[in-house]
Image (cartoon, rainbow, N blue to C red):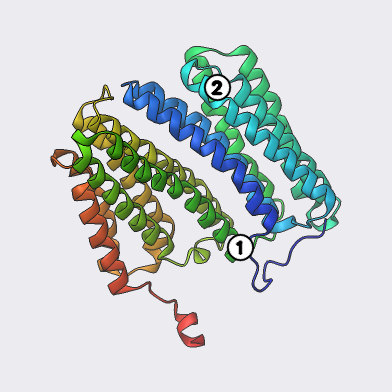
Amino acid sequence: MRPRDPEEPHRSASPLELFFDLVFVVAVANAAVQLHHALTENHVADGLLSYALVFFAIWWAWMNFTWFATSFDVDDWLYRVLTVVQMAGVLVLAAGIEPAFTEQNFTIAVLGYVLMRVAMVTQWLRAAKNPEYRTTALTYATGIAGVQVLWVLWLLVFDGVPALIGFVVLVAVELSVPWVAERKGATPWHPHHITERYGLFTLILLGESLLASANAIIEALQDETALAPLISISILTLVVTASLWWIYFWPPHHRAIGSLGSSLFYGYTHYFIFAAAGAFSAGIEVEIDVLTEHSKLGDVAASFTVTIPIAVFVLGVWLIAIRANADRVVNVVVPAGAVLVLFDPVIPIPITLTAVVMIVVVAVLVARGPTQPEHEKLTT
């Protein structure tokens, strides 16, 4: 398993990586649907907690495969088969999302997660045959395998509050594996390829919001009494989703992953960005339920299910990519815009203020443009 060249020109996502992402569409959609149901039934705390737990499994499995692939994607038959096995694990995880929300039963989800991770261990053992990266690859394989044993024990032994504490501890252990392994010898990641992969997953999550926009139109056609508000929320959702897309892809993300520390910060912060994007679509569905009188949440609480995810998304993107590539004006407007959307719930028409604020933020980004490092200016 020879490593890929981190300077390889025109490196882009492979058809296998795009195929791999399809199963995550299923998992993300299931998580968003279950969060929507929990929120609209006013089970806010339980719903958010379950969403945070299952989304960690989705995000972490995707991220581990993505960083491995950028370094060791040889695309032979065994690599493809092991990738398909990981896809099977994602589908099992997706099937376990509903009982995780409704019954706090994580058995199926954990089994799917462990299946994915065992396949990942096999990939790292293959990579360990390369002498240059043997120590790093074996550290990854040993760390991942050991944590999977702990996940099974967590499933069998813990319950209630101890289970939650155990989950947090195991998450910390999972997150520490790359830090320990990469310090043994950094794997050759490709900055442009890896950030393209993050961008593609962001598009998947924003696509869930576009689906929510379409659902608003469908509901409007079936409920004439709420026709105008539903059409309005559909249009506003499209505007906000397009703005989030614009904000995310405005900065040059590849500059954000130069060192190990910056790469881990970039990757780990994406948990909040991805989770927020998925929660945004669930929030739109909650707003639709409120307008059609199918929600137990009040108007203000329902608006927060939309505005909080937007604020988290924008602040996350600002932290990892915009802040270092923008001038003072942009670095004031973007975080200020994220804070301003939180005042939207006091407006009688849902998402109106948020849409206006997002348009202003995008306009400022377009007007100012990202800053260019000195060495790039000299090259230009």
Q: Residues within 10 Å of mark 1 (few under 14, many from 20)?
A: many
Front residue of 90/173: it is 90
Task: Give the answer, above or below, for where 88 lies relative to 297.
Answer: below
Residue 352: x %, y % from top left: 19, 48
- Residue visible at 66% across and 53% down? 17
Query: Is 303 placed above or below 191 here?
Result: above
Compare residues 319 and 1 and report the one nearer the observer: 1
Q: Is residue 179 visible?
A: no
Question: What residue is at 33 percent from the left and 21 percent from the top?
Answer: 41
Which residue has dot 1 on it?
Answer: 193
Tell me the crowding category of disc 2: few under 14, some 14 to 19, or many 20 or more residues within 10 angstroms, Cα based: some
Q: Is residue 277 left or right of residue 117?
A: left
At x 22%, y 36%, the residue is 224
In this rendered view, identify the residue nearer to me: 217 or 16. 217
Q: Seen in the image, is 285 located left or right of residue 28?
A: left
Query: Which of disc 1 and disc 2 is earlier in sequence?
Result: 2
Q: In the figure, is residue 23 to the left or right of 121?
A: left
Secondary structure at badge 1 equals helix
The residue tagged with tag 2: helix, strand or loop?
helix
Q: Position of 266 compared to 364: left or right?
A: right
- Quickly name the residue at label 2: 166
Which amino acid lies under the numbered mark 2 shown in the image of this protein?
A: Gly
Give the Cα separation between the discs numbered 2 and 1: 35 Å
Q: Position of residue 71 (x, y in %)?
A: 71, 57
